[in-house]
Amino acid sequence: MRNIGKKTLVTALLLGAAVAHAGELEQQLLRCSMLGDASARLGCFDELTKAATAATVAGTPTRDTTVAAAPGKAASTAPTPIPAIASATAAPPETPISRTEQSWELVPSARRGVFSFRPHRDNYLLLANYSAQSNDYPARAETPAGVPAKRVEITYQLSFKVKAAEQVAGLPIDLWLGYTQQSFWQAYNRAASSPFRETNYQPEVMAVLPINKEIAGLTVRYVNAGLVHQSNGQTGLLSRSWNRMYAELGVDRGNFSLSARMWKRLDNAKSENDNPDITDFLGHGDIHAVYRDNGYEYSLTARRNWSTNHGAIQAGLAYPLTTNLKGYLQVFSGYGQSLIDYNYSQKSVGAGFNVDF
């Protein structure tokens, strides 16, 4: 009877520990599921999984308990495992990884290895993008570019990046490859067979150095050196292209993040090329700021050439619809909404969807 009492007491204690740890696990899973950013949410669940795996591999201590024997037989002992739930539910860091750290894999817990796709610039689809006026006479062209364009068109942008190499030459520098494509589709222009008015292609290569130093209330996350080519794939008078090298600085604080670039054109602006004066309108750099709050995302991109007083500003508002799909509003004013319009001032407003993955 004494052995049975001990067994019952041990079993009750173990059951109570398991229930307590199960409650802790539920709380940790709930905390992860409430993170608004998809990347941060995935990182939180990854930390829980790693903790559970480590606990399983390491094994758990056991406690010997006596098993009651039948009359005439010796009592036997068997090890009773103590649940490993406590180790498996080790809490992830209280401070979530920032969006900037996730995007560029700046800390070990955010790393996914090489050739894992991530979003680069915004990915969106504007089902209706209305322009105040259409550029039917692109610069240097002597005749209209086909049938006059309609003021309402579909605009979309696809942008992604992959890490090609980590710790290049033994240094804390990662090498990334990026690609962005922006298209302006005259889908509602049936008279002209709904052509693509303009498509811009932008491949780039980037070397990223993590910084993670706090300065004046902001955390400097990284510096980035890049090479980028941008062109529209056209020939003759409609051809536009240029090459740049740039340096970028990324900072953030809480829900706010900002990146600033300065670039230098590599192809000689004075040579016989498609757009020798493009920097007069697109300037020598830009800034991109984002503020996120409860699933809402407010963005602003601006550039300006202070010598010529030309530039552009683009503002966006994304609001949650599903986990990764958001409604999206975009307003643009200035030069260079597309390469064909680099020296044409444009005002437009569009509505559609933004994809956050």
Image: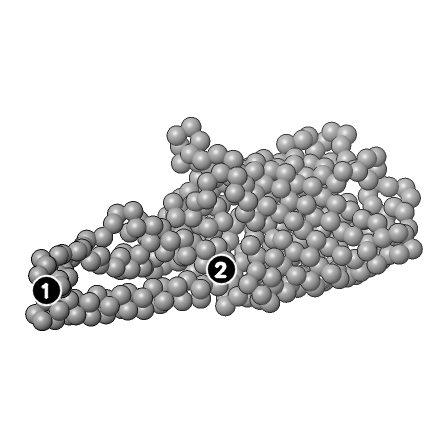
Q: Tell me if 168 is positioned left or right of 132 in this view.
A: left
Rendered position, 155 above or below 235 = below
Q: Is residue 174 visible?
A: yes
Tell me which label, 2 or 1, sits earlier in the chain.
Answer: 2
Distance (Cα) linking label 2 and label 1: 63 Å
Residue 92: quadrant of the picture = bottom left
Rendered position, 287 above or below 227 = below
Q: Is residue 309 visible?
A: no
Q: Residue at x 86, y 47 (%)?
A: 137
Counting from the top left corner in percent of width and height, residue 235 is at: 81, 35
Q: Mark 1 is on which residue type? A: Pro
Q: Nearer the viewer, residue 4 or 213?
A: 4
Q: Secondary structure at mark 2?
A: loop
Q: Quadrant of the C terminus?
A: bottom right
Q: Nearer the viewer, residue 115 or 149?
A: 115
Q: Which residue is mark 2?
A: 37
Q: Quadrant of the N terminus?
A: bottom left
* Numbered mark located on residue 71 in the image: 1
Q: Secondary structure at mark 1?
A: loop
Q: Nearer the viewer, mark 2 or mark 1?
A: 1
Q: Residue at x 90, y 47 (%)?
A: 146
* Numbered mark located on residue 146 in the image: none
Q: Residue at x 83, y 45 (%)?
A: 138
